[in-house]
Amino acid sequence: MDSRLIIPALAGMLVMAGLTPASAQGVPQLWGSVTVEKDMKKGFDASVTAEYRSLEDFGGSDRWSVGLDVSKRLYRTKDQTFTVKGALGVKYMDVFTPASLNSKVDGIADGLDESFYQEHKYGYNKTESYWQDRMRYVASVSAKKSIGNLGISIRERYQLTVRDSITLQKVRNRYPMVYDSALDDFVQGDLKQTSFTEVKPAKSSSVLRSRLQVDYKFKKAGLTPFVQAELFSDLDNGFSLAKTRVSAGTEYKVNKKNSLDLGFIWQDSSDDDEPAGSALLLGYTYSF
């Protein structure tokens, strides 16, 4: 492929990915990462990754993290078309949780704009935004089959996340009933706010992540476009399906040591880690 066509090809990949339901979610998050990896002897690989994620609409920071991963090739056929790998990893994360509003009036939804509750004098509680430290430990097994330039891979990953306890700042907002002598009746008075704290205890969660990926190598262009589908099963809640994630994008190998990843991701459910919706993926990897 002519080098002049590489950038249009990358843009095309993003447009195709944007045709997922994510396109209806508005401006996505940004998930950016930098990875340094070492290909060692006897099938061992090690990598260190620093990651940053923005809030939706790029309105601030959502997370930053740094992690270490080590993998080992467990099996490979003589023609090198089928490979099985095992991997272990650990990651430190600092995750932001935006402020939340909880209605205290029957029939009025949570999470509406604060001015709405105040305009209609609906009582509500507000939990202020906060950052929380987390440690994540992963163990995975993956297998990949190559058919010419086409690659098909599956991965099962166990993920344990441990969250520290934290003291949350909360505000109770109420409109007490007061007597109006002119009306000779009780009416809602002015807003009364009461601040208090609440301890959110330490917690751990276990998830099994099952991923299917298909990719295709355009060797001369250095491009490897891919599509992925991943299921998140909550092991703490009867192996129930917690979240589905789909993504598409491409790796661009600049040279032997440097590569770029560009893609688009969409997931259907929010959890403690990230909101539902879409994200733009940008990654850089240095290999030596």
Image: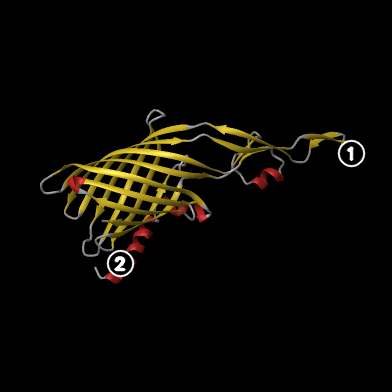
SS of the residue under disc 1: loop
Q: Is residue 162 left or right of residue 59?
A: left
Q: Which residue is mark 1?
A: 182
Residue lying at 70% horizontally and 44% vertically, measured from the top left: 118
Q: Position of residue 177 (x, y in %)?
A: 78, 34
**Which quadrant: the C terminus?**
bottom left
124 or 139: nearer the viewer: 139
Q: Which residue is mark 2?
A: 6
Neighbour class for label 2 at 10 Å: few (<14), some, many (≥20)? some
Viewer-side label of 1, 2: 2
Question: Dividing the picture into quarters, in which one does residue 122 lie?
Answer: top right
The amino acid type of the residue labelled 1 equals Ala
Q: Say whether residue 263 is left or right of residue 94.
A: left
Identity of the residue drawn at 65% across and 45% down? 114
Name the one closer to the observer, 64 or 81.
64
**Quadrant where the image shows the N terminus:** bottom left
